[in-house]
Image: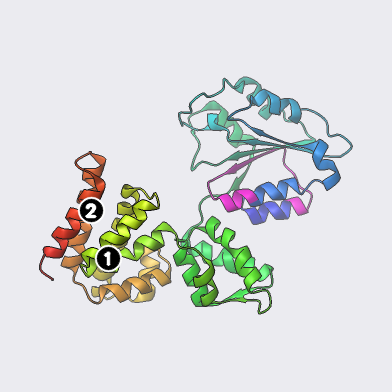
Amino acid sequence: MTIEQLQKELQQNQLAPIYLVLGQESALIEKARQLFKHYLPEEEQTMNFASYDLATTDVANALDDAESAPFFGERRIVFMQNPYFLTGEKVKNKLDQDLVRFQAYLEKPQPTTSVVLFAPYPKLDERKKIVKQLKKVASLVSVEKVNERQVQQLVTAELKQQGMQIESEALALLISKTNSDYSQIMAELPKLMLYAQQTKQITTAAVAELVSSSIEDNVFSLVPLVLQKKVGPVLTMYHELLLQKEEPLKINAILIGQFRLLLQVKILFEKGYSQGNLASVLKIHPYRIKLAMQQIKHFSKQTLAQAYLGLEEIEVKIKTGQGQPELLFELFMLQFAAKKVA
C-alpha cells in the first residue's frame, strides 16, 4: 500500500498486527513513522509506544514489549528498525538474533499490538525463510524512491494541502536543483513556504535564492564549460568540488550521465522526436530536456561522443587504479580541448 492508503486505514481505525515499511525514500519513511506514532493519544505514547534498533538491540527485547498488553489503552505500537537479517547484506558486529522466536511471533502475533518493521533497503533476500514468512503475514507499505514524474505530483499535492501554490518554472527549478530527490525537496519546502507565507505562492526567485544546489546541479554547470573547451574554468570548478570533499568517481559518474543524456537527446531529436516526446521516452523531467535541447544546438554528435567516451575511459582507469583521478581528469580536458571542433 502507499502512504496515502496507510493514512486512510489508520484514520478508519484499521490497524494490522504486522507492518513492513520497505524502501529508501527517507521523507516517506518519516511520514509513515509519524502516522503510526500519532495514532496513539499523546498521553499513551510513553507507556504504549517503543522503538528498537535491531542493529544494536536483540529482537527478543522488542518481542517482549510486543507481547505485552497495552497499559491503560487499547493499542501498543512497537517499531523494529534496521532489520538487517532480512537482507543479504554483510553487517559488521551483527547480533545473533533469535529468529526462531521472531518467526513464532509472526505466526501468532499479539492482537492488541502493531509491530512495524522499517526496512530501509531496496529489496529483501527472498530466499530467506523469515522473509517468506514475513511477506505472508505483513501489510506492506511501499516507501520506494520516487521517480521524477511522481515528484511533481507529490510536491504539488503537498503544497495544495498546505494552502500554497508554486510557479511552474519554480517547480521545475526546484526539481532541477535537487536532482529530483523527493526527500531533499521535502526538506526544502518548509523554508520556501515560510518565505511565501503572505503571498501563498512560491516563486522562481525564491527557489533560486533559498535552495542550495546539489552536487548534480553543480556538476551540471561543468557541462557547457567542458563542451566550450574552457580548460581553466573547468579545472577551477573541478578543484572546488574536490575541496568540498566530493568524490572524483562520483563527479565523473554524474558528468557521464549528463553527456549520455545530451547524446540521447541529440540523436532522438534528429530522428524527429519533439521536446515533449523526448521527456516521455527518456523518462526525464521536461525541464531537464529543455536545458539539454538548449545545449545540443551548438555541438555535433561527434563532439558529444568524444566527451562521453573520454569520461567513460576515466571511470575505467579510476576503478582499475590506473592513475590519480585528478590528473586523469586534467589530461582528459587537455586532450579534449586540443581536438578539432566538429
Find disc 2 in the rendering and name its residue: 329
Mark whose residue sits in front, 2 or 1:
1
* Residue 196, picture quadrant: bottom right
Name which residue lies at 67% across and 23% down: 60
Name which residue lies at 70% across and 25% down: 61
Is residue 161 found left or right of 270 in the rendered image?
A: right
Q: Residues within 10 Å of mark 2 (few under 14, many from 20)?
A: some
Amino acid found under the numbered disc labelled 2: Phe
Q: Residues within 10 Å of mark 1 (few under 14, many from 20)?
A: few
Name which residue lies at 20% across and 49% down: 328
**Residue 15 highlighted magenta (yes or no):** yes
Quadrant for the C terminus, please. bottom left
Is residue 74 found left or right of 186 in the rendered image?
A: right
Amino acid found under the numbered disc labelled 1: Pro
**Residue 44 highlighted magenta (yes or no):** no
Q: Position of residue 21 (x, y in %)?
A: 61, 43
Q: Position of residue 167 (x, y in %)?
A: 55, 77
Find disc 1 in the rendering and name its residue: 233
Q: Position of residue 24 (x, y in %)?
A: 53, 47
Element type at mark 1 = helix
* Residue 40, picture quadrant: top right
Q: Is residue 17 visible?
A: yes
Is residue 181 found left or right of 288 in the rendered image?
A: right
Q: Is residue 263 visible?
A: no
Q: Which residues are magenta?
A: 10-30
- Asked if the residues shown at circle 2 and circle 1 are in contact, with their CB atoms under 8 angstroms apart, the answer is no
List the single residue furthest toward the right. 72
Element type at mark 2 = helix
Is residue 180 found left or right of 315 in the rendered image?
A: right
Q: Relative to 193, is 134 above or below?
A: above
* Residue 217, picture quadrant: bottom left
Query: Front-most of 281 and 239?
Result: 239
